[in-house]
Amino acid sequence: MNYRAIVHVISLLLIFLSLGMASAGAVSQLQHDASSCSKIFFFCAGVTLAAALLGLLFARRRRGEREYKTGVREGFAAVAFSWLLASLFGALPFYCLADMTPADAIFETASGLTTTGASVIAETLTLNNGQLLSGGLESLPHGLLYWRCMLNWFGGVGIVFFVLLILPLMNYGKGNQLYNAEVPGLKTDSEQLTPRLLSSVRLILGVYLLLTFLATAVYWLGGMEVFDALCHAFATVSTGGFSTKAKSIGHYQSAFLQWSVIFFMFISACNFSLIVKVFITRKFLFFADEEFRFFAYLTCGASVLVALFLYAHCPAGIPGLNGTIPRSTEAFLRTAFFQVTSLISTTGFATSDYMQWGVTPVLLILWCIIFPCGCGGSTSGGIKCSRLIVIFKQVHSEIKRCLFSRTLSDVRLSGNRIEQSLVHKTMAFVLLYLLVFLGVGVALTFLVQADLQTALGAALACLSNVGPGFGAVGPAGHYAWLNAPAKYLLVFTMIAGRLELYTVLVLFLPAFWKR
């Protein structure tokens, strides 16, 4: 194990994190927060930068020393420990500025970086000094609200991507292992966009920046202030879901704005390589992709079903976060599409509290769509639609073999044949996903004595990086009431879910650390 190479990667990540803290300090000054706010941000940035420089000093190559050789172990370790240390250092502003407890600060940071969007910030949050957070989310300074959304944005496309832009310049070996450990979803041989990894990363980052700019502009035109538009763009494109308003998107009554958020949530949950290919080939190849078709049909079908159930069971309108949503076809469709797209993309924005709808079939539909979630190669979490398609096709193949025993398995995704080893790995991943979901849910019932709906809802919401769950952690709920052990368990769950389980769980194998 090349520990110096791992420390080098983590140090580069901390440099980016310190720059983000410094930008939050600048925003705090521009938004006329108290003068101490920007000073605290710059102090936290300085501490993070000092730790990064010490790491670079430890990891530097000696004169005449060969370049570092990295393998799959270094890739997994670098990614997993990068997310862990980023959650620790990123929590400094919450701890120093908002006076949160370590458990709350780390939970909020990990939730931001993993683009989960689960929050402990509420009026009932107990601070270090024993007092409650008076005023809730909107009482926080602008700099801290910006930092929350920037954590979403950093974590969305993957902090490691930023490191991959630097690694080739430092001659520290190849970055393919980091790319494979970071990019979520089912990979096939055709997914490499360009022959060079660095070019692929730059193209994806370019798309990420373009979507962020477009979302900011559209939200501003839809009625948001520039600050709120930028923060919500960060949270939308990253499918993170942190908002500057306690009522999330429900704070805004504009139908245009809500449909715009629906569009950007949907497109951000699609495979970014499809968007890149539009610029490369000048062709719209989305519907040629089997996973996109499945995702689009699932989103639209679930939304229409939810809208029909709501129209039948809510004659007086839908209970919203900012008043009752009137009974009209457009409003019901908008509410249904918004909530379904928000959950299936793992963004977690809300305009209404589905726990107050009182429609059991709707809750069942929402439970089901949180498992597959978005597409591979996107910023969303969950199992991913591609894996679900492979599982369905493998099950169909096995059923067919009961009748034709000599039939060879031929599972294909968008015309590309999936190797049996990858099929088996996919099935093992889904089984492991369900086991972790149930294990965390059961553990929560003992740690906080929550009801089963709340415990399983919190476990699924954090493992799939959705944010709002069910029961006490629904859209109008929060995670502040959990005790410290439960919060740390969910921090691990969020990171494991964001890195798709294998990257984190492989570290617990004794063979991983042996020479």
Image (spheres, helix red, strand yellow):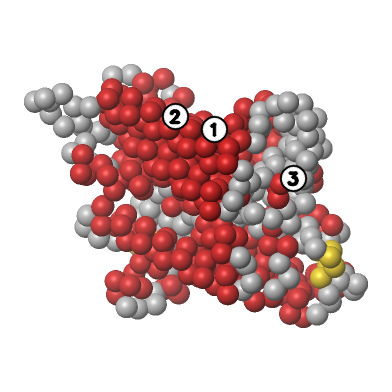
Is residue 396 visible in the rendered image? The answer is no
- Residue furthest to the bottom in view is 329
User: Considering depth in this image, is 419 or 73 the residue closer to the camera?
Assistant: 73
The quarter in which the N terminus is drawn is top left
In the rendering, which numbered label is found on residue 47?
Answer: 2
Q: Which residue is drawn at 30% across and 57% down?
A: 202
Q: Which amino acid type corresponds to the residue marked 3 in the rendered image?
A: Gly
Q: Position of residue 230 (x, y in %)?
A: 54, 60
CA gap between label 2 and label 3 equals: 28 Å
In the rendering, which numbered label is found on residue 253?
Answer: none
CA gap between label 1 and label 2 equals: 9 Å
Examine the image and state in which quarter residue 333 appears: bottom right
Q: Position of residue 167 (x, y in %)?
A: 25, 42
Structural crowding at the residue carrying mark 1, measured as other residues with C-alpha within 10 Å and reported as few (<14), some (14–19) or many (≥20): many
Q: Which amino acid type corresponds to the residue marked 1 in the rendered image?
A: Leu
User: Considering depth in this image, is 318 or 38 the residue closer to the camera?
Assistant: 38
1 or 3: tag closer to the N-terminus: 1
Q: Where is residue 330 in the image (x, y as percent from the top left)?
A: 74, 80
**Marker count (numbered):** 3
Please tell me whether mark 2 sits on a helix, a strand or a loop.
helix
Please tell me whether mark 1 sits on a helix, a strand or a loop.
helix
Tag 1 residue:
92
Q: Compared with residue 25, is residue 240 higher up or lower down, i.e. above or below?
A: below
Residue 441 in the figure: left or right of residue 59: right
